[in-house]
Structure formats: C-alpha cells, structure tokens
Amino acid sequence: MLAKSDLSRWLAALAAEFRVVGAVSDGGAPPAWRKLEPGDTPVLDNLRWVMPPKEQVLPGYEPLFTYCARKGEEEITSAVPAEEPTLMFGLRPCDARSFAVLDATYLDGRFSDPYYAARRAQMTTVAYVCESKRWSCFCSSVGDPVEWVKACDLAITDAGEDAWIVTAFTGKGEKLLEAGGCMSAATEAACASRDAIWEDLARANEHFDAQAVARAVDWEEPVWAEIAGRCTGCGICSYLCPTCTCFDIQDEECPGGAIERYRVRDSCQFCDFTKMGHGHNPRPGKKERTRQRLSHKFKYLPERSGMSGCVGCGRCIHLCPVNTDTRKIIAEVMGVHGQ
Amino acid sequence: MDSNPYQPHLATLEDVITETSDTKTFRAAFRDTDLRETFTYEPGQFQEVSVFGQGEATFCLTSTPTRKGYIEFSVKKVGQVTESLHGMSPGDVVGIRGPFGNWFPYSEWKGKKLLFIGGGIGMAPLRSLLNFCLDNRSDYGPVDIIYGARSPQDFCYENEFEAWGGAPDTRLHLTVDRGDDSWKGNVGFVPAYLNDLNPSPEGLIAITCGPPIMIKFVLQNLDKLGFAPEQVYSTLEMKMKCGIGKCGRCNIGDKFVCIDGPVFSYAQLKELPPEF
Amino acid sequence: MPEENQIAGQETVKAWEPRILGILCNWCSYAGADLAGSARLSYPANVRIVRVPCSGRVDPSFVLRGFMRGFDGVLISGCHPGDCHYAKGNYYARRRLTVLKKYLVKMGIPEERFQFQWVSASEGGRWAESVSEMTERLRGLGPFQGVALQDKPAPHREAAAV
Amino acid sequence: MSVQAVLANQLAEVRREARRVLESGEVKTVLGYRAGPTAVRAMPALITRPEDTDLLVWSPACANNLGLYVRQAALEGKVAVVAKGCDARSIVMLIQEQQIPRESVYIIGVACPGVVDPDRLADAGIREEKLTGASWDGAEIVLESPEGEARPGRESIAKMACLTCDVHTPPLYDILIGEAPAIEPVDGLSPIPEGTEDRRAFWAKQFDRCVRCYACRQVCPSCYCTVCFADRASPRIVSKRIRGQENWMYHTVRAMHMAGRCVECGECERVCPVGIPLLQMMRELGAEVDELFAFKPGMDPEAEPVFGVFKNEDEGPEP
C-alpha cells in the first residue's frame, strides 16, 4: 500500500536509480511523457487522454548520424543514444501493451533498430490501472488489459481512503517497492478494491478477436469509401496512436556545413507516403489510405506477429477531426463478414 | 549484420558507364578494403545508395557476387537522388548499405531451362542473375534472354550482348518498340515477342522485370502459354526508405517488400492485394 | 546567435556582430548598392545580400526562414512605387510585406529587426546609410533569441535531446 | 414550444430542402452532418441518395467546416451545402478566389448560435457519453441527459471560434433556416500574452509541442493548394524536422498564406491534438488585414482577394 501523500517521496527515491518518466500536463496542454522534475505530479487517473508514450522510444524527430563532407576526411559519426535505466511511471494498460506491439516491429526480424533498442533496453514499466473507461476507450474489446498490466514490472491500483495498492509482478518490481521505504502492508479492503477494478477493466460489451477481425477485414469493403469521403487525410490517427511508427528518412545540412540524416515521424495517411520518384503511387486516394491503416493494424500485423496492432486506447476515435469511430468500422466489417 | 543497419559504408565510385540518355551504371568499391572482400550478396538483392545531403535511394545490385572486389548498380534519372548521382564522376564518395531483401532461389533451379524477360532498366536485376548463371553455366540448362527497349539507343549493357549471345546454349533475343533504319532485329513489344518465341513451359523458369505495364502483359501471356505461377518470378518495385522492415513504406498485405521481397513468385504476387 | 555560427568556415567571432539578411530587387536597390560600392561609400559588412528580380518576388517565407535560421535582422529593399521594372511588383510587395511586418511583431519579433524600404538605382548613399543605421540599431537590440525554446526542451522533446 | 421542438422543426426543414434539391436533380450531392459517436459529436456527411437525407442532423454538435468538401464534390456536379455562418464564409472565400463558380453550389443556410467543442466538456467536468442530445435556447447551449437539461454556460463549452464569431447568420445563402439571436462577441479569451519578448517565448513553447500532424492544414477550407509548401522537396521551403523552429516556420508561413483568406471558423484550433491556440494567431493576423485594407474574407462574393489588388494610397515605407 502507498499513501497518496507519500507519492512524491517514493518518486524522489526512485529518481536516484532511474530516469523517472511520467505524463505531466504543462499549462492545459494534454499530458505528455517527460522526465519528472521534483514537484511534478504524474497523471494517475483516466479523466483525460494523454500523449502516447512512444515519443520516449521513437521521438518524432531523431538524428541518425552526421556526415562530414570535407574532401579526404569523409566520415560518419553515429547518433545512437546511450542506454539509461528508465522508469515509465503511470502507464495505462493500453500504453503498457503498446511497447509489446512496438517490439514486434522494431526488435524482431534480422534487423533490430539500434536507436529504439537503446531506449527500450533498460526500461522498467510501472502501470496504473484505470478505474473507469472514457467513452472512447475499448482496450478490453481488443485484448485482456489485466494480462497487459501483469506483463509490467509493477502496477498501481486505487485502493480508496487516499491510498494505492501496489502489486509487483517481477523481481525488478519487488526492488522498486523497497525504494524510499514508503510502502505498508496491503489491507483486506485494498485487495478487494484492486480485484474489483481489475475485473471491471476486463469487462467489455463488444469483443473483437484479433484473428477473427483479421479474417473479416476485406479489400472491397463498402466502409472504406464511406470513411474516405469525409476523412481529411491528416496524420492525427497515426501520429497520436501508440503503436503507429512509420517514419521518413531525410538528409539536411546543419549549421556549420555537416550533413545530418535524420528520421522523422510519417503517416500512411499522407498523400505522398508511397509516391515513387517517377510518379507512380500505389495508394493514390484516401480510400486506399484509410483501408491501409486499419488493414495494417487489424489484419497484416496480426498475420505477421500474431498480436493485434491495436491496443484500444481510443485516441484515434477521440481526436479524429471528423469523428470517425474505429470501433464502428470494425463492427461493420465484422457484421458484414464475421459473426 | 552490422550494429547499425541505418548507417552506410563509404564507397568511392570507380567507374561511371553511360548506358542510355537517362541511365548510367555505377561501379563502386568500399573504402574499407577488407569490407570489399567480406561484402557478400546474392543476385536479386538490393542496396540503399546514399548521396549525402540529397538522400537515399533503392537500387538493385546489378553486378554478380561471383565477380569480387566491386559492386555495380544502374540508375535511371527520375528524382532528386538519381539526378545528383548522374552528376557524379569517378572518385566521388557515396554511402552504401545492404545487402537487403531476399534473392532469386537459383539453388532450386539447378538443371532447369531459364528464360529472362527484361524491359528497359528492368534488365538490371536480371543481369545480376544472368551473369551469375553464366559464371556457373554448367549448373543450368539452356538459357534464353528476351530484352526489349523503347528504341535501339535505349538498350543497357550493350557491351555484354556479345558475351551473352556467345555463351554456351544461350540465345539473346532483342526487340525494340520503335525501330530505326540502323536496326536489323525484331520490332515489337516484349509480351508480343514472347508469344512469337512461344517457349514451352516444360522444366523452365521465367524471370521477368520491367515497367509495370510490360509485366502485366508478360504475366498474362505466360499464363496463356501454360506457365504455372510457381515457375514465374519477378522483382517488385516499391517506395522504400529504411530497407529493413521498420519504416512501413513498402508494406503490401502482410508482406514488407524490403524484407519479404523484392523477389516474389507470380504465385505469391497473386496472393498480395492488388496495390503495387 | 542561438545556434553555432550560420556561415560555414567562420571560426570564433570576437565581439558579437549582428547578421542582416538583405533582399534587394535587381533593377533599383541592387544597382543602388552597386553604386554605393563603386562610389567607395563605406558601410558595415554585416549584411548578406540576396538578389531577386523584383521586391514582388519576395515570398514571406524568405523572411521567416531568415529569422528561423538565425539572422538578427532582415532588410528588404525595392524600387520606389512607379519605378518598378515590372510596373506592379512593388505595389503587391508593399501590401504583403506590410502585413508581414505587423504579423512578425505579433509573433514576438520586434519591429526594428525587419526593415522594408525603397531605394532607387541612384540612391547609393541612401542604401549605405540604411545599412549602417540598421546595424547600429541591431547592436543596441542584441542578438535575436531565435524562434525555438532556449532553456528546457518541451516535455516530449526531452528524449530527442538525450 | 420547447427548445428541442424548435430545433426539430429546423432539422425537418433542412431534410425537406435537401431531399427536394436531390430528388429534383438540381444537385448531385448534399453536404451535411450526420450523427457521430456521441450526442455532441457529429460527422460530415456526403449524401447522394434522397432517402439518405433522413440521416442528416442539425444541432450544437455540428462543428466541422463543410466548406472543406465543396471543391471536390463540385467536380461531379452541383452541390448543396448545409452551411453555418463560417461554412458559408468559406464557400464565399472559395468563390472570391475562383476555386468554385457561384452556380456550382446551392447553400442551405442555417442560423447558428454557436456549436460545442467536446474537448472543453471534459474540462467543465461533463462526461460526454452520458449526454443524449444538445440544442439551443436562444444563444445558450442546452445539454440533455437522463438527469434532465443542463446549461453549463456558452463560454465554458462552446467552440472558441463561436465565442468571438459575429457572423451567426450566413452572409450568402439560397435559403435560410432558423433565426440567430443577436450575440455579442466575447473579448479577452486569447491566451497570447502582451509584449514582444513574452510573445516570442509563448509561441516558441507552443510550437515546440506541435507534432506536425498537419490536421490544422487538412481541415482548413482556405488551404486548397494541391501540393503544400511543407510537402515540397525541391525547393525545400521548410524542413521536415519535427522540432521547435521548423514547426514555427511551418505555422508562420501557413499563417501568411491565410492572411486575407482565413474566415475564423476555428477548426484548426479545435482539431489541434496538442491544443495550440492557432485561431487566436489567425484572428490577430486577420485584424491587421482588416485594419490595413478594410477586407474581411468570405463576406462578399464579388470582392477581389486582398493581395491580388493594390491601391496607390496603400500604407507602406515612406518614399
């Protein structure tokens, strides 16, 4: 058990060993993930949406290397970041799961991404279990959020009477409990409140089984054209999605004459994402592009790595300028084909 | 695989051969001498060539791994990187990283007849496999090469036509879309010329690469000639940036062309959604 | 200068010197500046001149790019109304750049850092005087703080700064 | 008559008019709003079949600017648009800039007292999924839920643009539905500080949070370039780096393109995921243009674009 008043003391103790990262709101902006300074209180509720934590492992702009072009002394200096023990504090179940989906792309196959690996290597995850779902949340429809929480090192759940119950799942998690000596034994009521919250979290009114959706998503769906009609083609549903990680690589000169190659976030919704040098573009219109985003998440990624590409966080639903609801699309796709 | 797959190795251009008005072939050798020996690749694989300050572009390795010490790639002038490449001369420095992607399954084709069907710059990936097979000539049966171009001045690798035509049991069939008075050979599109040659599919592997319009009709004609989809192979061209299956650009269906391709059999291409 | 020096090859700069981006129309102001040179008029060398066919060719993005890349001031000079080689270029420029000047102030770039003036081909003196006057003014103002955050990178930029 | 009944009549009139122009073949497409995922979120609707006009809704949930879809839809034939004040201004701006001919659009004008910005509901402690409907009572926005009606106050839940809007009745229409009450624009809402140095620091902080999702550009009817300067590789006017200063450049260059075009519909500020006050920036710029050239975009279809013309006595440097 951790008294809510002891939170800052515990965070200070943790900060001694880790770079503690939490979601903090600066002046009315949506809470974003950054290193916690003394006096910052991370968001530990589900009242508002928060920026996706992927920014900490896959920043929007990341230099890959710089190339010195002086004749005869051409050489490349890499910009792979140094590894640092990081503690992601207060990950909601959907965001905790998003790291597993990112790993499937960035750490698998013959090539592991060194930049992502360096930031992800020494990462400890502390989950915060939401007591209630917002209108756009559908984590329990695409998976089992309780399992996702158990995949973290530690979980914080509200235990009522101004305290949290803290449950460790790994050795690393146990060690975190000792930091700062702020923990007390868990009371009976606290465990009951935790179990109730966890059970409520897992409940879902509609359930989209990843493989069933993968089979149902089809090429000639009438729904693609219908969405494309109103979609504005902006990048919100991919930039603010915790598991969307396409990027672009560009070269540009830096002040001082060196050349920097950097990668920067990109989206399959933008019109020139697949446009080739000689002009051919396999996905010329919005219909193809909206179909690609949802097919990749709900069909191609499950077929490649066995896990759904969507963690049900609802950011794409909450933030879409034209209020396209991803759940309605899947329901329509399932209704048309699936059960 | 080296530690950072995004970081290219520096290479110096040794030779720049002008093939046609808009295509040049570049021969490059790594600066790091022992890398020159250890750098191995298979016919059909591609590499990412960096023109620092302009960007990177994807080019298939057109040289054959059997001829060591250098690598070659052909570049058609279409965009920013290709244009700056065309402005380069021997001695300039480029970045090369790779090899990436899969390759032609030549080990399964031992003893089989081979039919190469190339169009324009599409001959580049086929040349790597063709020279590889000619260097191991005894492993393969009779070889036929159909190579088409828009006009007689648009042929690449003309200096190798001699070697190709003269190789044992190898026939080179050239055709142009529009002939001129100096042109003696066949005039007509590659798919039509394929029908005239009427190859029998028995024990034969067809490998084709060229502009999408040519591939579309070549595959149709091969169907009509009784070729099974498993007998026909092609390399797919898609926009690529990372080359290692991370940036999501070349994703079609559940495949990433840069790691599951670029070489696909016609059977595999049929399963992919029609989006390339 | 918020970032290391913009112009390649210039090692350490002793006292801080303001850098001015000068965009001059080819027919009047550039000729005026040329006249100032041939008339041996001395004026500070802080201005880097870019020649454009007409002040009407000046796209606001040139000015904004100048400030983004770290110039301390931007000076645009064109033909007097009525003298424009292309008849109307400077009239269009006048509307556009007047709105730009007011907009820059709203975005936090002081009015003194952006000057827009008419200099004809015969007014070499006026050109030299305008450059020295602007250089003096910018020396008083000090270096431009730039358009990006100086102290602490924003919450989710912290990862990129590692 | 209850506020809901007044709104229901207006909606019935909108649907009747939409069905009439579709069935008569006068228009090929009707642009309107249909129900969204919650009672305060509507979705743009592109309707081509007369029976689908029953999907149309009209309530404080209709926040999108439908001017965005007119150019594309007009390619296939005449378009009818359910247009609020700002939507109609966007259409007039497109006519002024010769992007669409006047006769290609049939404007079903609707008087609009101001729509809801759902994100502001969360700040006001209202859970939008509990709401069953929304309507107007004069200038006030009424939220209906199982517990009854609530009037949290226009200034706390309305879209920012609606609080400073003075065009509650469309400036151009073929038919007008509903009657907008006189509503005084509210002042002092802008979070932008005074003083040049504070403004520089303020915008540096705002644009550092920008993630360059380009939603502000994609929802804007005034942003109609086929290839945007931000996507152009050569010449590369603004770098693709998602970083403070490059974001600043993207937004300021776009703002200069919007001078004399922005109709202050506030969609850019509403959809911005990181909450950058883009509308307030555009309003300041618009005020400058209005003061200098007495020009408000999208009010008079015959007016010429402000930067396409000039006058001898325009303000400028002294000779």
Image: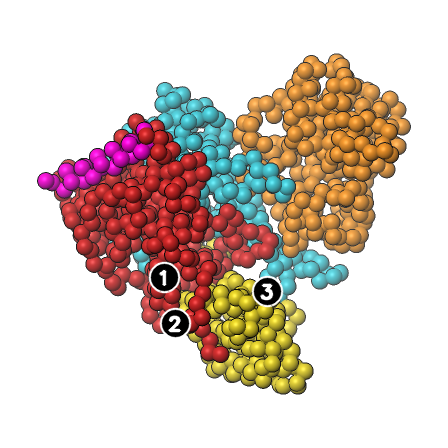
Chain colours: A cyan, B orange, C yellow, D red
Residues at discs 2 and 1 both on one chain? yes
Callout 1: chain: D
Residues at discs 1 and 3 both on one chain? no
Magenta segment boundaries in residue numbering:
D1-23
Specify whether B91 is left or right of D231: right
Which label sits on residue A255? 3
Q: Residue, x 35% and y 59% (percent of image)?
A: D296
Mark closer to the chain start, 2 or 1: 2
**Label 2, label 3: how far apart the Cα atoms are:** 27 Å
Residue B36, image x, y percentages: 78, 45
Residue type at mark 3 is Pro
Residue D110, placed above or below residue D253: above
**Label 2, label 1: how far apart the Cα atoms are:** 26 Å
Q: Residue, x 46% and y 25% (percent of image)?
A: A220
Q: Residues within 10 Å of mark 1 (few under 14, many from 20)?
A: many
Which label sits on residue D295? 1
Residue D200, image x, y percentages: 41, 68
Which label sits on residue D196? 2
Residue type at mark 1 is Phe
Callout 2: chain: D
Q: Residues within 10 Å of mark 3 (few under 14, many from 20)?
A: some
Q: Please tell me whether residue D59 belongs to the stretch shown in magenta.
A: no
Residue type at mark 2 is Thr
Q: Nearer the viewer, mark 2 or mark 3?
A: 2
